[in-house]
Amino acid sequence: MNSKKNISELLLKNGIRPSVQRIAVLSYLHSHYTHPTVDVIYSDLSPEMPTLSRTTIYNTLKLFSESGIVKCITIDEHHQHFDGNINPHAHFICHNCGTIEDIFYDSTEKFNFPQNPNLHIERSEIFYYGLCKKCYNI
C-alpha cells in the first residue's frame, strides 16, 4: 500500500484531494508502525520537505482521522499518537518508556459488551498498560 499511486487512490476514495504533503504523511504512517506523534512525523519528513509545517501535519492527521483512514490514539490530553493501521487491534502502552505496540486478535472474536438497546456502539478502543520487554528486563 506504500506506493504513491495506491496512497493517492486511497485518499480519493475517501474524498480527500491528494497533495504532496498528504501523500507523504499517509505514506509515512503506512511504513512506520511506531504510532508517531505530530512532532515525530515532522522531524522525520521536514528534512526532505522544508516547506512542511507542524500545523499542516496536525491538520492532515485530523482530516485523516475524521475520514477513518488513520486512528488517533489519545493516551491523555497531552499525548496524541497516530496509527495508519485501521484494522481491528488493541494497543499496549509501556508506562515506563511510553512505547506503543499493536496487539492483534482474531477479528471474529466477540467481546462481551453490555447489551443496551439504547446504545449503538460504533467503535471501541482497547488499551493494555504495563512494562514492555525492554523495560521489564531492566
Image: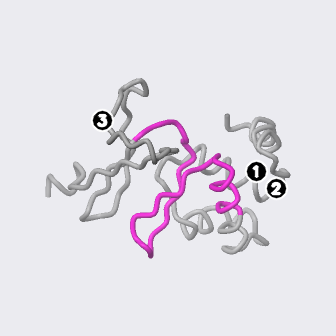
Q: Which mark is residue 112?
A: 3
Decide if residue 5 is on the left or right side of residue 65: right
Q: Marks 2/1: CA distance?
A: 5 Å
Q: Amino acid at mark 2?
A: Val
Give the residue at x 43% y 47%: 124
What crowding class fits label 3: few (fewer than 14 Cα within 10 Å), some (14-19), or many (20 or more)?
few
Q: Nearer the viewer, residue 118 or 22?
A: 118
Q: Amino acid at mark 3?
A: Asn
Give the residue at x 84% y 55%: 19
Q: Amino acid at mark 1?
A: Ile
Q: Is 104 situated above or below 92?
A: above
From the top left corner, tell me how far across and down residue 29 is, in percent: 59, 50
Please tell me in which quadrant of the rendered image residue 116 appears.
Answer: top left
| Mark 2 element type | helix
Q: Marks 2/3: CA distance?
A: 43 Å
Query: Magenta part of the protein: which range?
Result: 60-89
Please tell me in which quadrant of the rendered image residue 31 appears.
Answer: top right
Scheme by which the image is coloured:
one colour
Q: Nearer the viewer, residue 15 or 101?
A: 15
From the top left corner, tell me how far across and down residue 53 is, in percent: 71, 74
Is 69 within the magenta?
Answer: yes
From the top left corner, tell me how far across and down residue 136 is, in percent: 16, 54
Residue identified by numbered label 2: 20
Q: Which mark is residue 10?
A: none
What crowding class fits label 2: few (fewer than 14 Cα within 10 Å), some (14-19), or many (20 or more)?
few
Residue identified by numbered label 1: 23
